[in-house]
Amino acid sequence: GFVPLEDIPVWTPTADVSGEPVCLRNEKLDQKISLYRGDITMLEIDAIVNAANNSLLGGGGVDGAIHRAAGPMLKKECASLQGCETGEAKITCGYGLPAKYVIHTVGPVAQGRVEKEEKKALRSCYKNSLTTASKNEARSVAFPCISTGIYGYPSEQAVHEALATVREYLNEHHDKLDRVIFCVFLPKDYELYLQNLPLYFPAE
Ligand code: ADP
């Protein structure tokens, strides 16, 4: 069944971490982060982010799963948006999904090779998705691991960009969001987030 926000545990940092924190502690951000392993289409929250392609007309991976679960009305609304540039984000209704909105963002195609441009585009995806959520008063937002599937962005590098960008946004706009959920599908990604979350959201 659907997973309501209340059933998604808040992530809390542990004091003993492997690496050096890259950010200072900010107690205003306590209770704002979740790490969830499972299907993003089941989340009963304000907004889920879709790792879409430039056409916004649906694809494989998480995009396909979101369109299947939302039903044909989603494709209809997406078709009216005239595509989306890489790094940008556009919002639609959730239709058959338990989430109220879908925020469609287009990650960079990396195929294992990351340079400045891809890194900048991936960061823009996270930033523009959060800005779009805030503008629409969506207070709970879940992200899949954008670009790390078919688009081939190396997972560990992607985790750092995701965490750095979300942390940066929350520093400025913590009042606008109640929860940011990193919704991972693969055990490897779950481990990477567990390892790296305390570096960006340290306990002390
Ligand atoms: P991209 O084209 O941006 O690389 P993909 O959909 O291929 O996007 O992969 C992005 C991530 O989404 C991958 O980590 C993949 O395992 C994950 N994923 C696939 N289906 C789902 C789902 N239903 N819920 C959450 N994550 C998913």
Image: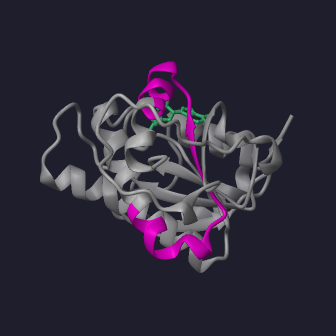
- For this orientation, the residue located farthest to the top is 187
Image quadrant assignment for residue 95: bottom right
Q: Position of residue 152 (x, y in %)?
A: 30, 32
- Residue at image coords 58%, 62%: 78
Position of residue 88 in the picture relative to residue 49 (left or right):
left
Q: Is residue 147 above or below residue 96?
A: above
Label count reads 0
Image quadrant assignment for residue 34: top right
- Residue at image coords 54%, 61%: 27
- Residue at image coords 58%, 69%: 133
Q: Is residue 191 above or below residue 136?
A: above
Q: Position of residue 202 (x, y in %)?
A: 44, 47
Q: Position of residue 172 (x, y in %)?
A: 45, 75
- For this orientation, the residue located farthest to the right is 1
Query: What secondary structure is the magenta-colored segment mainly?
Result: helix
Q: Position of residue 140 (x, y in %)?
A: 67, 60
Q: Is residue 136 above or below residue 65?
A: below
The image's colour scheme reads: one colour
- Residue at image coords 44%, 41%: 198
> In the rendered image, is residue 35 in sight?
yes
- For this orientation, the residue located farthest to the left is 115
> In the rendered image, is residue 86 in sight?
no
Asked if residue 137 is among those painted magenta in the image, a careful observer would answer no
Which image quadrant: the N terminus? top right
Image quadrant assignment for residue 55: bottom left
Point out the stretch of residues depicted in magenta: 168-194
Q: Nearer the viewer, residue 189 or 202?
A: 202
Q: Nearer the viewer, residue 180 or 43?
A: 180
Q: Nearer the viewer, residue 95 or 178?
A: 178
Asked if residue 193 is among those painted magenta in the image, a careful observer would answer yes
Position of residue 104 in the picture relative to residue 95 (left or right):
left
